[in-house]
Image: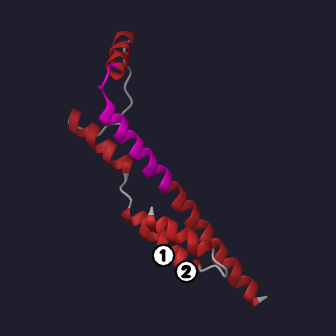
Amino acid sequence: MAHKASGNASFTSIPPDHVAAIDAYKAALKALPDCSKVATEAAGAKSGSVQSGIQEVTEEEANAIQAEATTIGAGSEQRARDEVEEQIRECTKACWGNLAASYLAKVRSQVEQVS
């Protein structure tokens, strides 16, 4: 998050420092864990092989899963983990988008200097 904030500050500074923004966004992406890989590995470890994580369940199984999730205290750690993973995914998306915008702004400013 600190690298992302640094990139945002560099990108929006006057004049913008696109090189520093690019470096900061790259550092942020390098520091962020890959949540999708962790989830895939965890699913593979449980079943002995890597699977997509999508599984059809019966109505009874779905009801049991829902009842377990609504039990007081049950799943609170998993919910907290899911929230952190979602924040990581959102930060990753933002950094990739900001990195692309920084590259485009850098090229645009170079073209404007040549013109």
Determine whether 115 is above or below 64 in the image: below
Residue drawn at (37%, 64%) of the image: 31
Q: Mark 1: which secondary structure? A: helix
Q: What residue type is labelled 1?
A: Asp
Which sits in the foreground, 80 or 50?
80
Looking at the figure, which quarter contains the C terminus? bottom right
Main secondary structure type of the part rendered in magenta = helix
- In the rendered structure, the answer to whether residue 41 lies left or right of residue 13 reads left
Give residue 16's quadrant in the image. Answer: bottom right
Q: Mark 2: which secondary structure? A: helix
Magenta segment range? 71-91
Q: Where is residue 52 in the image (x, y as percent from the top left)?
A: 37, 36
Give residue 86's quadrant in the image. Answer: top left
Residue 23, which numbered label?
A: 1
Mark 2–mark 1 contact, CB under 8 Å?
yes
Task: Inspect the magenta stretch and tell me whether residue 80 lies in it.
Answer: yes
Q: How many other residues sit within 10 Å of disc 2, few (<14), some (14-19) or many (≥20)?
A: some
Residue that carries the numbered disc 2 in the rendered image? 19
Q: Which amino acid does label 2 sit on?
A: Val
Task: Inspect the magenta stretch and tell me whether residue 27 lies in it.
Answer: no
Residue drawn at (57%, 75%) of the image: 10
Q: Where is residue 47 in the image (x, y as percent from the top left)?
A: 23, 33
- In the rendered structure, the answer to whether residue 93 lies left or right of residue 30 reads right
